[in-house]
Image (tube, helix red, strand yellow):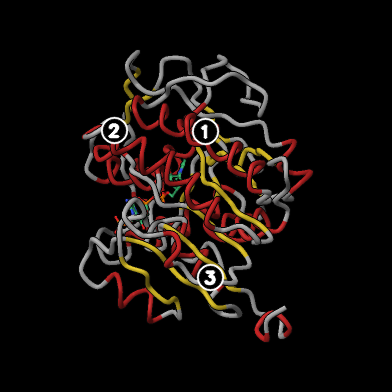
Amino acid sequence: MTAAELQGRWNVLVTGATGRIGFPIARTLARDHNVFGVARCSNPGDEERLRRVGIEPIVGDVADIDPRSLPSNLTYVFHAAARIGREADSDWHRTFEVNAQVTGRLIAACRGVRGFVFCSSGSTYAYQGRRPLREGDPPGVHLGVYSLSKVAAEAVARFASVEHKVPLTIIRIFSTYGPLGGAPADRLERIVSEKEIVLHPNAPNNYNPIYEDDYVRLGIKAMQVATVPPLTVNWAGSETVSAEDYCAYLGQLVDKEVRFRYDDRAPWPLWPDVTKMHEVLGRTQVPWREGMSRMAHARSARRWPLSPTSTNQHNW
Ligand SMILES: NC(=O)c1ccc[n+]([C@@H]2O[C@H](COP(=O)([O-])OP(=O)(O)OC[C@H]3O[C@@H](n4cnc5c(N)ncnc54)[C@H](OP(=O)(O)O)[C@@H]3O)[C@@H](O)[C@H]2O)c1
């Protein structure tokens, strides 16, 4: 055991450390532990943003970093870096390399850690109609190359975990949201801009959004419960709420009418079963109305007026 470990300090590697999920998790861990954050730092000021909260930046593409150059004596790894959205579609070979192969290489390079978390996605499930998605449900293609690469990544990660005896938790992330954004924040932007909200025709579009405070806590817990063979668990809010209902609430907060359009081409709603998550990680604590209100205040304060009735509803 190293001197740092004797003092209860962990050495944690967080990839995707500038992102919506990686940053708040790394920032929280850095209060008590040594945290190394990997990202390309594509936006101006990213490196400084990490340093300011005590995260040691490792700047580079996860596909190009020599895993042997990573810090030794790591206690935990939270692997969130991935090619997402338009970047995922732009070059599918690279997307499979970054999202799948790199995950296997990292696990192999991190032999000896107590736990490794791989960020998978609720987008890896085939649509099951109007019922929540369970961990044993079959894979499907929700978002093209991205979903395919995450299905592949899970298989690579499972193999690498067992082969190299690295305790692993695969978290299937559903809709995250908070001050740093997420699907509900994107929908809020559309409401403010008076654009319609496009949803799947199989209404209501049920989700279990998970707010930042909760995803930080459950992300850290996920590292600590990792096992060989790996644990696979949905990662979402404990409450179900439809996009129709939370958008209506966001509309009230910003005093805008919300217009919905139902379209067969819209991605199907990602509605998780959180029974297993409650057993292994626990429940979330931020009620959806409070979370949506906190998000709207954090993102809107300087950009658009909130409805007078929406102010001071919560103590934060
Ligand atoms: N947020 C959600 O609701 C959600 C849902 C399902 C799954 N997930 C999964 O959760 C993880 C984190 O998502 P997020 O929402 O936090 O995404 P995000 O905000 O877009 O952050 C992605 C992070 O990864 C870094 N990154 C991307 N490509 C990289 C590369 N090739 N090398 C090194 N760093 C790279 C980005 O920084 P640079 O661009 O500067 O490198 C950024 O720090 C991803 O694996 C994603 O698939 C998220």
Q: Residue at x 73, y 83 (%)?
A: 6
Give whichever of 141, 180 is nearer the camera.
Answer: 141
Q: Residue at x 63, y 21 (%)?
A: 137
Please tell me which of labels 1 and 3 falls first in the chain. Answer: 1
| Residue corresponding to mark 1 | 122
Q: Residue at x 73, y 48 (%)?
A: 227
For the residues labelled 2 and 1, the Cα–Cα distance comes to: 22 Å
Find out if the beta carbon at label 1 lies less than 8 Å from the nearest ligand 1 atom. yes
Q: Residue at x 50, y 44 (%)?
A: 104
Amino acid type for the residue under numbered disc 1: Gly
Tag 2 secondary structure: helix
For the residues labelled 1 and 3, say whether their Cβ atoms are less than 8 Å apart: no
Instruction: Please say if 266 is above or below 152.
Output: above
Of circles 3 and 2, the one toward us is 2
| Residue corresponding to mark 3 | 316
Amino acid type for the residue under numbered disc 3: Trp
Give the percent coordinates (x, y) of residue 80.
Answer: 46, 52
Give the percent coordinates (x, y) of residue 264.
Answer: 35, 13
Is residue 310 visible to us here? Answer: no
Tag 1 secondary structure: helix
Give the percent coordinates (x, y) of residue 298.
Answer: 39, 63
Q: Which label sits on residue 93?
A: 2
Amino acid type for the residue under numbered disc 2: His
Please tell me which of labels 3 and 2 falls first in the chain. Answer: 2
Please tell me which of labels 2 and 1 falls first in the chain. Answer: 2
Is residue 219 visible to us here? Answer: yes
